[in-house]
Amino acid sequence: MNALTKITAQPDLDITDIAKARYSAKSYDTSKKISDSDIVKVKELLRFSPSSTNAQPWHFVLASTEAGKERIAKANDEKFPFNGPSVRAASNVVIFAARTEITEDYLLHVLDQEEIDGRFASDPETHKAQMHGGRSMFVNIHKDLDDVAQWNAQQVYLNVGQFLLGVAALGIDATPMEGIDTVALDAEFGLTEKGFTSLVVVAIGYRNAEEDYNAALPKSRLPLADILIEI
Protein backbone atom coordinates (compact mmCIF):
# COMPACT_ATOMS: atom_id res chain seq x y z
CA MET A 1 0.00 0.00 0.00
CA ASN A 2 1.38 3.41 -0.91
CA ALA A 3 0.47 6.90 0.26
CA LEU A 4 -2.13 7.27 -2.51
CA THR A 5 -3.97 4.07 -1.66
CA LYS A 6 -7.21 4.54 0.23
CA ILE A 7 -8.94 1.83 2.18
CA THR A 8 -12.56 1.57 1.08
CA ALA A 9 -15.38 -0.55 2.43
CA GLN A 10 -16.12 -3.75 0.55
CA PRO A 11 -19.84 -4.56 0.66
CA ASP A 12 -19.21 -8.28 0.16
CA LEU A 13 -16.69 -8.47 3.04
CA ASP A 14 -17.96 -8.18 6.60
CA ILE A 15 -14.93 -8.28 8.85
CA THR A 16 -17.06 -9.09 11.90
CA ASP A 17 -18.33 -12.23 10.17
CA ILE A 18 -14.73 -13.30 9.59
CA ALA A 19 -13.86 -12.62 13.24
CA LYS A 20 -16.80 -14.72 14.38
CA ALA A 21 -16.11 -17.56 11.95
CA ARG A 22 -12.37 -18.03 12.53
CA TYR A 23 -11.23 -20.43 15.23
CA SER A 24 -8.16 -22.43 16.21
CA ALA A 25 -8.05 -25.42 13.89
CA LYS A 26 -7.32 -28.72 15.63
CA SER A 27 -6.77 -30.94 12.60
CA TYR A 28 -5.38 -30.21 9.13
CA ASP A 29 -5.95 -31.76 5.73
CA THR A 30 -2.44 -32.75 4.66
CA SER A 31 -3.49 -32.92 1.00
CA LYS A 32 -4.33 -29.21 0.82
CA LYS A 33 -1.54 -26.65 0.50
CA ILE A 34 -1.69 -22.89 0.51
CA SER A 35 -1.09 -21.50 -2.98
CA ASP A 36 2.06 -19.56 -3.81
CA SER A 37 -0.04 -16.46 -4.47
CA ASP A 38 -1.64 -16.67 -1.03
CA ILE A 39 1.74 -17.24 0.62
CA VAL A 40 2.82 -13.91 -0.87
CA LYS A 41 -0.16 -12.34 0.92
CA VAL A 42 0.67 -14.21 4.14
CA LYS A 43 4.15 -12.64 4.06
CA GLU A 44 2.67 -9.19 3.49
CA LEU A 45 0.41 -9.65 6.52
CA LEU A 46 3.53 -10.21 8.61
CA ARG A 47 5.18 -7.06 7.23
CA PHE A 48 2.27 -4.68 7.47
CA SER A 49 1.17 -5.15 11.04
CA PRO A 50 0.95 -2.03 13.19
CA SER A 51 3.48 -1.54 15.98
CA SER A 52 4.08 1.16 18.56
CA THR A 53 6.05 4.02 16.94
CA ASN A 54 6.44 1.75 13.88
CA ALA A 55 9.37 0.08 15.63
CA GLN A 56 8.56 -3.32 14.05
CA PRO A 57 10.56 -5.27 16.68
CA TRP A 58 9.90 -8.69 15.21
CA HIS A 59 11.38 -11.53 13.22
CA PHE A 60 9.76 -14.59 11.61
CA VAL A 61 10.62 -18.08 10.51
CA LEU A 62 8.32 -19.43 7.79
CA ALA A 63 8.43 -23.19 7.34
CA SER A 64 7.00 -24.32 4.00
CA THR A 65 8.78 -27.66 3.59
CA GLU A 66 8.33 -30.94 5.41
CA ALA A 67 11.89 -30.65 6.69
CA GLY A 68 11.28 -27.14 7.99
CA LYS A 69 8.07 -28.10 9.78
CA GLU A 70 9.80 -31.13 11.29
CA ARG A 71 12.52 -28.91 12.76
CA ILE A 72 9.86 -26.85 14.54
CA ALA A 73 7.92 -29.92 15.70
CA LYS A 74 11.00 -31.74 17.02
CA ALA A 75 12.11 -28.67 18.97
CA ASN A 76 8.78 -28.80 20.83
CA ASP A 77 8.28 -32.55 21.10
CA GLU A 78 9.85 -33.01 24.51
CA LYS A 79 7.78 -30.43 26.39
CA PHE A 80 4.74 -29.92 24.15
CA PRO A 81 4.17 -33.09 22.11
CA PHE A 82 0.44 -32.37 21.76
CA ASN A 83 1.19 -29.55 19.30
CA GLY A 84 3.33 -31.72 17.04
CA PRO A 85 0.48 -33.10 14.91
CA SER A 86 -0.74 -29.62 13.93
CA VAL A 87 2.78 -28.44 13.09
CA ARG A 88 3.48 -31.50 10.96
CA ALA A 89 0.10 -31.60 9.18
CA ALA A 90 -0.34 -27.89 8.44
CA SER A 91 0.56 -26.45 5.05
CA ASN A 92 2.95 -23.89 6.55
CA VAL A 93 4.12 -22.84 10.01
CA VAL A 94 5.26 -19.43 11.24
CA ILE A 95 7.45 -18.71 14.26
CA PHE A 96 6.85 -15.22 15.65
CA ALA A 97 9.89 -13.84 17.48
CA ALA A 98 10.58 -10.54 19.24
CA ARG A 99 13.70 -8.43 19.51
CA THR A 100 15.26 -8.70 22.92
CA GLU A 101 16.48 -5.10 22.76
CA ILE A 102 16.27 -2.02 20.55
CA THR A 103 19.60 -0.47 19.70
CA GLU A 104 20.43 2.89 18.18
CA ASP A 105 21.65 1.15 15.04
CA TYR A 106 18.30 -0.57 14.68
CA LEU A 107 16.41 2.70 15.17
CA LEU A 108 18.48 4.30 12.43
CA HIS A 109 17.83 1.29 10.17
CA VAL A 110 14.06 1.77 10.59
CA LEU A 111 14.46 5.49 9.99
CA ASP A 112 16.41 4.91 6.78
CA GLN A 113 13.70 2.57 5.50
CA GLU A 114 11.02 5.15 6.26
CA GLU A 115 12.98 7.67 4.20
CA ILE A 116 13.30 5.20 1.31
CA ASP A 117 9.55 4.64 1.48
CA GLY A 118 8.87 8.38 1.22
CA ARG A 119 7.73 9.13 4.76
CA PHE A 120 9.73 12.37 4.91
CA ALA A 121 9.38 13.65 1.34
CA SER A 122 8.23 17.18 2.16
CA ASP A 123 11.02 18.11 4.61
CA PRO A 124 13.40 15.16 5.05
CA GLU A 125 15.84 16.48 7.63
CA THR A 126 13.22 18.02 9.93
CA HIS A 127 10.76 15.13 9.77
CA LYS A 128 13.48 12.49 10.14
CA ALA A 129 14.79 14.22 13.25
CA GLN A 130 11.29 14.50 14.70
CA MET A 131 10.48 10.85 14.01
CA HIS A 132 13.77 9.64 15.42
CA GLY A 133 13.39 11.81 18.51
CA GLY A 134 9.83 10.67 19.18
CA ARG A 135 10.56 6.98 18.69
CA SER A 136 13.74 7.20 20.79
CA MET A 137 11.77 8.86 23.58
CA PHE A 138 9.43 5.88 23.86
CA VAL A 139 12.27 3.37 23.59
CA ASN A 140 14.12 5.21 26.36
CA ILE A 141 11.01 5.20 28.55
CA HIS A 142 10.95 1.42 28.33
CA LYS A 143 14.69 1.18 28.86
CA ASP A 144 14.24 3.16 32.07
CA LEU A 145 11.44 0.79 33.08
CA ASP A 146 13.67 -2.17 32.16
CA ASP A 147 10.86 -3.72 30.13
CA VAL A 148 11.99 -3.30 26.51
CA ALA A 149 11.73 -7.04 25.86
CA GLN A 150 8.19 -7.10 27.24
CA TRP A 151 7.23 -4.02 25.18
CA ASN A 152 8.63 -5.67 22.06
CA ALA A 153 6.66 -8.83 22.80
CA GLN A 154 3.48 -6.77 23.02
CA GLN A 155 4.10 -5.46 19.51
CA VAL A 156 4.57 -9.01 18.23
CA TYR A 157 1.22 -9.99 19.73
CA LEU A 158 -0.37 -7.12 17.79
CA ASN A 159 1.09 -8.79 14.71
CA VAL A 160 -0.27 -12.21 15.71
CA GLY A 161 -3.77 -10.79 16.14
CA GLN A 162 -3.78 -9.10 12.75
CA PHE A 163 -2.25 -12.20 11.18
CA LEU A 164 -5.00 -14.51 12.49
CA LEU A 165 -7.74 -12.23 11.18
CA GLY A 166 -5.91 -11.66 7.90
CA VAL A 167 -5.37 -15.30 7.04
CA ALA A 168 -8.99 -16.02 7.96
CA ALA A 169 -10.02 -13.38 5.40
CA LEU A 170 -8.01 -15.38 2.84
CA GLY A 171 -9.96 -18.52 3.75
CA ILE A 172 -6.95 -20.02 5.54
CA ASP A 173 -7.28 -21.78 8.89
CA ALA A 174 -4.78 -21.21 11.68
CA THR A 175 -3.67 -22.56 15.04
CA PRO A 176 -1.78 -20.16 17.34
CA MET A 177 0.40 -21.98 19.89
CA GLU A 178 2.06 -20.69 23.03
CA GLY A 179 2.79 -24.31 23.98
CA ILE A 180 6.27 -24.10 22.49
CA ASP A 181 9.77 -24.67 23.82
CA THR A 182 11.19 -21.21 23.23
CA VAL A 183 14.68 -22.20 24.40
CA ALA A 184 14.81 -25.13 21.98
CA LEU A 185 13.36 -23.10 19.10
CA ASP A 186 15.78 -20.23 19.69
CA ALA A 187 18.68 -22.69 19.63
CA GLU A 188 17.40 -24.57 16.56
CA PHE A 189 17.10 -21.42 14.45
CA GLY A 190 19.93 -19.36 15.94
CA LEU A 191 17.54 -16.67 17.16
CA THR A 192 19.34 -15.77 20.38
CA GLU A 193 22.59 -14.76 18.70
CA LYS A 194 20.58 -12.70 16.21
CA GLY A 195 18.98 -10.77 19.06
CA PHE A 196 15.52 -12.41 19.03
CA THR A 197 13.45 -14.79 21.11
CA SER A 198 10.53 -16.89 19.91
CA LEU A 199 7.09 -16.22 21.38
CA VAL A 200 4.36 -17.91 19.36
CA VAL A 201 4.06 -20.52 16.63
CA VAL A 202 1.13 -20.33 14.21
CA ALA A 203 0.28 -23.27 11.97
CA ILE A 204 -1.72 -22.38 8.83
CA GLY A 205 -3.49 -24.47 6.24
CA TYR A 206 -6.92 -25.99 5.70
CA ARG A 207 -8.94 -27.88 8.28
CA ASN A 208 -9.75 -31.55 8.17
CA ALA A 209 -13.46 -31.02 8.77
CA GLU A 210 -14.13 -34.68 9.60
CA GLU A 211 -11.55 -34.78 12.40
CA ASP A 212 -11.54 -31.19 13.66
CA TYR A 213 -13.85 -31.24 16.68
CA ASN A 214 -13.41 -27.52 17.24
CA ALA A 215 -14.98 -26.69 13.87
CA ALA A 216 -18.40 -27.83 15.09
CA LEU A 217 -18.32 -26.06 18.45
CA PRO A 218 -19.95 -22.64 18.95
CA LYS A 219 -17.68 -19.72 19.81
CA SER A 220 -17.79 -18.57 23.42
CA ARG A 221 -17.05 -14.99 24.40
CA LEU A 222 -18.00 -12.88 27.40
CA PRO A 223 -21.00 -10.61 26.74
CA LEU A 224 -20.42 -6.95 25.95
CA ALA A 225 -21.96 -6.00 29.30
CA ASP A 226 -19.00 -7.68 31.00
CA ILE A 227 -16.24 -6.07 28.94
CA LEU A 228 -17.46 -2.73 27.58
CA ILE A 229 -18.19 0.66 29.11
CA GLU A 230 -19.91 3.11 26.77
CA ILE A 231 -19.70 6.78 27.67
Image: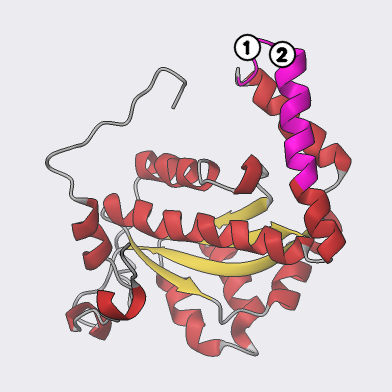
> Which quarter of the rendering shows the N terminus?
top left
Q: Position of residue 43 (x, y in %)?
A: 49, 44
Name the quadrant containing residue 98: bottom right
Quadrant the C terminus occupies: bottom left
Outermost left residue: 12
The kind of residue on which mark 1 rests is Ala
Q: Main secondary structure of the magenta part?
A: helix
Q: Is residue 181 visible?
A: yes
Q: Residue at x 38, y 22 (%)?
A: 5
Q: Is residue 188 above or below residue 83?
A: above
The residue singled out by tag 1 in the image is: 121
* Residue found 46% across the figure and 20% down from its top: 3
Q: Nearer the viewer, residue 104 or 222?
A: 222
Placement of 214 over or under 144, stated as above or below = below
Q: Does the magenta segment cover residue 169?
A: no
Amino acid type, label 2 = Pro
* 144 lies left or right of 31: right
Horizontal and vertical percent for residue 47? Answer: 54, 42
In which quadrant of the rendered view does residue 105 lie? top right
- Say what secondary structure mark 1 lies in: loop
Q: Is residue 65 visible?
A: no
Label 2 close to label 1 by CB (< 8 Å)? yes
3D distance between C-alphas at marks 2 and 1: 6 Å
In this rendered view, identify the residue nearer to me: 99 or 144.
144
Give the residue displayed 40% in from the left and 61% down from the top: 91
Q: Position of residue 76 (x, y in %)?
A: 62, 81
Vertical order, 159 against 85 (above or below): above
Residue 124: assigned label: 2
Which range of residues does the magenta coloring cover?
119-137
Q: Is residue 98 above or below residue 88?
A: above
Residue at 18% across / 37% down in the picture? Answer: 10
